[in-house]
Amino acid sequence: MLAPAYERLKAALGIRRKTRFISRTFQYALIDEEVLERFPSDGRPLLPHPAPSTLRREISSHEFIDEWGIRWRMSPPTPYFEAVEAPLRGAARADLDRYPWPDLGHPSRFQGLAEEARALQRNGYAVVCLSGTALFEQIQLLRGMDTWLTDMAADPEFAQALLRKVADLMKASLAALLDAAGDCIDLVVTGDDLGTQNAPIISPTMYRRLLKPCHAELLAEIHSRSQAKVFFHSDGNIRSLIPDLLEVGVDILNPIQVSAKEMGDTARLKREFGDRLSFCGGIDTQWVLPRGTPEDVRVEVRRRIKDLAPGGGFVAAAVHCIQPDVPLPNLYALFDEVAAAGRYPIFL
């Protein structure tokens, strides 16, 4: 949930504890245990510690520079930070070797995670580790989206060098994480937002030439060092890339943005890929949750469960984190209908 939405829910439930964050940048709230119990959740998050960096700096309560050197600023009433400075926008090939990259594989990032994960498993929860691995997106933030897309089309050698550098950092992070706690992690969350509302951001041909080998390498690191399932996040219409994601080792696809072209027919997605792929999400956040009635929400929940749940392989969830414009009655309808309809055997 986005922090303003979560504050409203906490107030309704009488929770006065200060909100913590999964992501300060995007203002994703870390949900309190009593809320996870009130609206039953099967999983609990596991969060590596921040990476050592010489670049991280607090500027004000509304502006900071992160470990990668990216400047973020919150400009109210916008409820999250936006990237306002891409530190490698003007970089050349030689600059990549001189840049003060964060140490993603530093042991301090993973201290205590195994003990925390084992405690969660003893309590009956799936351990969902947020690895921070998002290669395409991270480079987009470092380079600027316009520059990064131009790189891939006009200077593929530079693009490959930058991909190699960042992929190696992320591979070191995954190796250290899984060496420390891999035997007690159930899901490793990775991803890259590869889609727009209508189509992939880059062509499938470009994806296969530049990004797919790196994704395959990173996901192989997870599978070779653990029994964890790979949870891969990508918004947008990525229907044409699903076979590629299966080939590189994706087990669970999120968020199934049903408002995006070719993603709305969830029954078709289940028929085509459900024997090889689990789905997480699918409950529309673009129209139904913020603009529909509670009954509209219930109908939506039942539809997605009917399409995606038979035979297993569906994690019922909203397409995106709950936004501030979602009315509380709609949020309750989502939780309650999942609890009522999302039990096996499925009879919808």
Image (cartoon, helix red, strand yellow):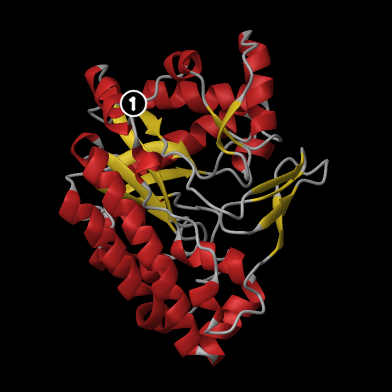
Which corner quadrant holds the C terminus? top left
Q: Is residue 42 left or right of residue 9?
A: left
| Crowding at mark 1 (Cα within 10 Å: few <14, some 14-19, many 20+) | few
Looking at the picture, how far across and down is residue 104, in whole percent?
42, 53
Q: Nearer the viewer, residue 98 or 296?
A: 98
Identify the residue shown where x is 65% and y is 67%: 87
Looking at the picture, how far across and down is residue 67, in whole percent?
56, 52
Q: Is residue 183 left or right of residue 57?
A: left
- Judge whether 14 appears above or below 279 on screen: above
Q: Amino acid at mark 1?
A: Asp
Identify the residue shown where x is 60% and y is 84%: 150
- Which quadrant would residue 8 be assigned to in this image? top right
Looking at the picture, how far across and down is residue 68, in whole percent?
57, 58
Q: Is residue 272 visible?
A: no
Q: Is residue 198 left or right of residue 169?
A: right
- Which quadrant would residue 127 be assigned to in this image? top left
- From the image, tell me which residue sits under label 1: 42
Looking at the picture, how far across and down is residue 194, in whole percent?
49, 66
- Judge whether 223 appears above or below 1 on screen: below
Q: Residue furthest bottom?
A: 154
- Judge whether 334 appears above or below 224 on screen: above
Identify the residue shown where x is 22% and y is 18%: 122
Identify the residue shown where x is 42% and y is 56%: 191
Which corner quadrant holds the N terminus? top right
